[in-house]
């Protein structure tokens, strides 16, 4: 893939992200669950947009994938475990509801696995 193609792809994601962010905001009672996906890892955080601060953040580097069910494999399994870890950290912080922000990514694969893991962990969207 050429550098020009990668730049075009990234620019499209940023445009989609801005479009989603125009409609989705987080508050202290219902923070925004933002997901970032890199080639190796996945990051999820709960953000209070009113205070402009991160309430809880989890990354796949610090997650045990043994928590995820056997139906998931590879990076998707790690993403599911990241969602579970985020939900348990949110419960500790007293947060039970959130608004999901997919950050311009399609809702499938690892992004969907994070959402399903967070739901399974007790976070409500």
Image (cartoon, rainbow, N blue to C red):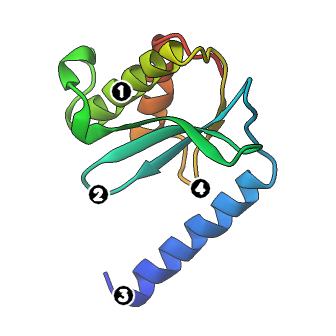
**Of callouts 4 and 3, the N-terminal one:** 3
Residue at image location 20% in from the left, 36% down from the top: 74
- The answer to whether residue 15 is above or below residue 116 is below
Q: In the image, which disc is placed on residue 2?
A: none
SS category of the residue bearing label 3: helix
Residue at image location 54% in from the left, 48% down from the top: 106
The residues tagged by marks 4 and 2 sit, at their Cα atoms, a distance apart of 16 Å
Q: Which image quarter is the C terminus in? A: top right
The residues tagged by marks 1 and 4 sit, at their Cα atoms, a distance apart of 19 Å
> Which residue position is annotated with label 1?
80
Judged left or right of residue 40, residue 106 is right
The residues tagged by marks 2 and 3 sit, at their Cα atoms, a distance apart of 16 Å
Pick the front one: 12 or 81: 81
> Which residue position is annotated with label 3?
3
**Of callouts 2 and 3, the N-terminal one:** 3
- Rendered location of residue 53, percent (x, y): 62, 45
**Of callouts 2 and 1, the N-terminal one:** 2
- The answer to whether residue 95 is above or below residue 26 is above
Judged left or right of residue 99, residue 92 is left
Judged left or right of residue 15, residue 109 is left
SS category of the residue bearing label 1: helix
Q: Which one is closest to the eye, mark 2 or mark 3?
A: 2
> Which residue position is annotated with label 2?
39
- Rendered location of residue 68, percent (x, y): 27, 18
Q: Which one is closest to the eye, mark 3 or mark 1?
A: 1
**Quarter of the rendering containing residue 11:** bottom right
- Rendered location of residue 21, percent (x, y): 72, 53
**Quarter of the rendering containing residue 46:** top right
SS category of the residue bearing label 4: loop
Is there CB contact under 8 Å for labels 2 and 1?
A: no
Pick the front one: 59 or 100: 59
């Amino acid at each position: 893939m050429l550098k020009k193609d990668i730049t075009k792809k990234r620019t499209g994601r940023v445009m989609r992200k801005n479009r989603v962010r125009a409609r989705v905001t987080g508050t202290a009672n219902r923070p925004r669950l933002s997901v970032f996906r890199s080639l190796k890892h996945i990051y999820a955080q709960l953000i209070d947009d009113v205070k402009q601060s991160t309430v809880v953040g989890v990354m796949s580097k610090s997650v045990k994938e043994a928590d995820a069910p056997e139906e998931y494999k590879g990076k998707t399994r790690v993403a599911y475990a990241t969602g579970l870890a985020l939900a348990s950290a949110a419960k500790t912080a007293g947060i039970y509801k959130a608004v999901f922000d997919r950050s311009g990514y399609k809702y499938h694969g690892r992004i969907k696995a994070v959402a399903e893991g967070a739901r399974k962990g007790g976070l409500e969207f």
